[in-house]
Amino acid sequence: VAKRFRWEANRRPTMAATGVQPVPSKRLRAEATSDQHQLADPKEMQRRLFQELSRMFADEVPLYGASLEVNCVCNRTAASLLESTYQGLHLSDAVLEQTSMERHGAIRIGTAQEYEWIGRFFAVFDMEPHDFYDMTNLGTKSQPIIATAFRSASQPENRMFTSLLQTSYFDDTTSQRIEARLAHRQIVSDRARELIEKSEMQGGLVTKDAEELIQEARNSIFKWSGHGHDRELYEDLCKAGFNIAADIACFDTHHLNHLTPNTLCIDLYTSAMKYCLGEISESAFRMQAAVALQQHAKMVDSAMLRLFFNHLTHDVVGKFRFSELKQGVVDELVDDLVQCLAKEQFAFNRLPHSGFKDQIEGPAPEAPVLLRQTSYKALSEAVCFREQDGREIRATHSARFGEIEQRGYATTAKGRVLYDRCLALATKTQAEAGCPEEAAEAYAKAFQPFPSTLDSLCQQGLVFAIYAPSATGLAAKGRIQETSLDKLVQAGYVHREPQRYEDFLPFSAAGIFASNLKQYGTTCTAAQKPTFTKQSLEKVLGRSIFDPASLCKQVEHESVQHVLHALGISGSRTIE
């Protein structure tokens, strides 16, 4: 049986190609001469980095650690539901832990120099820049930042959405004040820079050095200090609606704004968190949880199973026996969930919190594409501003929140156009609705043009897939006359596998920002609004930014070529 086809993206460009030329110190050159053949695995280093960041964030924000426990419980409930409908499916605690361990973080950077160092830092951990996000051009949701996301090119487990403040978005006086404040800050320590340069020189780090760099990240680069400077600038920016700029410019460190886990059923998690925070009653939670689980059972077919759990191959899933959801299963699962969340550890209403976001961002649950995300709102945290005259001013600041996400299928250009059209309609009709129930119905109706299955989505050219020859197809090699890809799949000669969306939605991210900053968007105050481009951010990084859609397209194309060759379909014929 053929293994699932996988495509590996090209490795990181050489330093010469990027134009970044580090000048190593004598100490660095001496250290780089030993242990070059015992380098740590960058992917394993990445896992260690995000484990440490998760521990750090849980120490800093107790509600984050508590929300991870809710996610684990909800994922176990969703998995039990799937096990009841797919006979033969067993999802162990280890599998669920691996699924729940994925993290998507976010940091905001102040200067181009800091941003370049952060890009070089993530490269040590096999994390490349993917896609360009212009957050200054989102209409009423605009913010004074541009961004990329650092992640592995192939089968990413972790991501870091990394924003760069654009001071040219502001009037000259404000811009100069921000730049003067940031000019005195060094985020990446001298030792971290030495280790980054060492990795660039020798193609990686030995385990001891890797662990030291991880601790530098935990203890300085991403750690919340609660210490700010220039209270007057902070207040002026916030009063003008530039809360993000205040968060970036007026504190000692970058600090994580959130660290998002992966969930199997975002609607279930959302209801559970609102219940634990005391925002909805037990009866309301029972009703919402039952609806979420019934919808989950309806939506998760064999393709979605493989999207959620990449250890499941097409052949393995094909051996499961599907059965309709039995009466009473959902009620029993909800009873168990309520009993679990009644434990003292889930009484989140006793923890400091600002409530949960009203709406999930992204497509309706019936449209299994792209990304759905929501969050508990940013906490109000104590900070201390240290002024130049020695005064210390106590205040509060809100910037760090708790996001959650559920990922769907990666869309083609055609699929993304359809998504944008559906989202525009959903936003309009939702705003015109007379009550929350009508608003939810209008939002869901707007996304009805999207089919709910992978096969239908592919047949309409809306999502990318990966194709692989089946055992039946390999047995018929050289005798297959069919050239329609859909018919080859239907005949059982070819397996169609999903490609997961691994990136971000600017409009959704802006919606998260709006909820957490308590302000909807910003307006450029520069005399003339500047234009920000992918090329300008690439210049800052000193290297190219990957286009995720092109990568998905290449993965699909190469898998089709693999099918042609494996099934003995002549090169003069093409698969339609």
Image (cartoon, grey):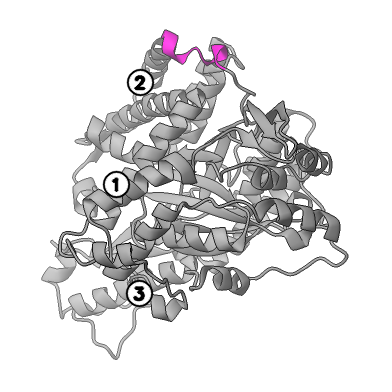
Quadrant location of the N terminus in the rendered image? bottom left
Residue 368: give x, y in percent of width and height: 48, 48
Residue 457: give x, y in percent of width and height: 47, 58
Is disc 1 placed on a helix, strand or loop?
helix
Name the residue at 34% across, 56% down.
155
Residue type, numbered disc 3: Ser
Q: Is residue 348 magenta?
A: yes
Does label 2 or label 1 sit earlier along the sequence? 1
Does label 3 or label 1 sit earlier along the sequence? 1
Q: Which of 466 and 92 is in front in this view?
A: 92
| CA neighbours of label 2 inside 10 A, class few (<14), some (14 to 19), many (20+) | some
**Rendered position, 98 above or below 174:** above
- On screen, residue 414 versus residue 575, left or right, reads right
Name the residue at 22% across, 48% down.
318
Residue 205: give x, y in percent of width and height: 27, 58
Confirm whether residue 307 shows in the render: no
Name the residue at 62% across, 35% down.
227
Confirm whether residue 506 shows in the render: yes
Name the residue at 34% across, 73% down.
10
Q: How far, Cα to Cα, is label 3 from label 1?
A: 51 Å
- On screen, residue 545 versus residue 36, left or right, reads right
Number of the front mark, 2 or 3? 2
Is disc 3 placed on a helix, strand or loop?
loop
Report the magenta residues as a range.
342-351
Marker disc for residue 211: 1
Q: Which of 227 and 565 is in front in this view?
A: 227
Q: Which residue was labeled with disc 3? A: 484
Residue type, numbered disc 2: Val
- On screen, residue 491 versus residue 520, left or right, reads left
Marker disc for residue 329: 2
| Picture quadrant of residue 103 | top left
| CA neighbours of label 3 inside 10 A, class few (<14), some (14 to 19), many (20+) | few
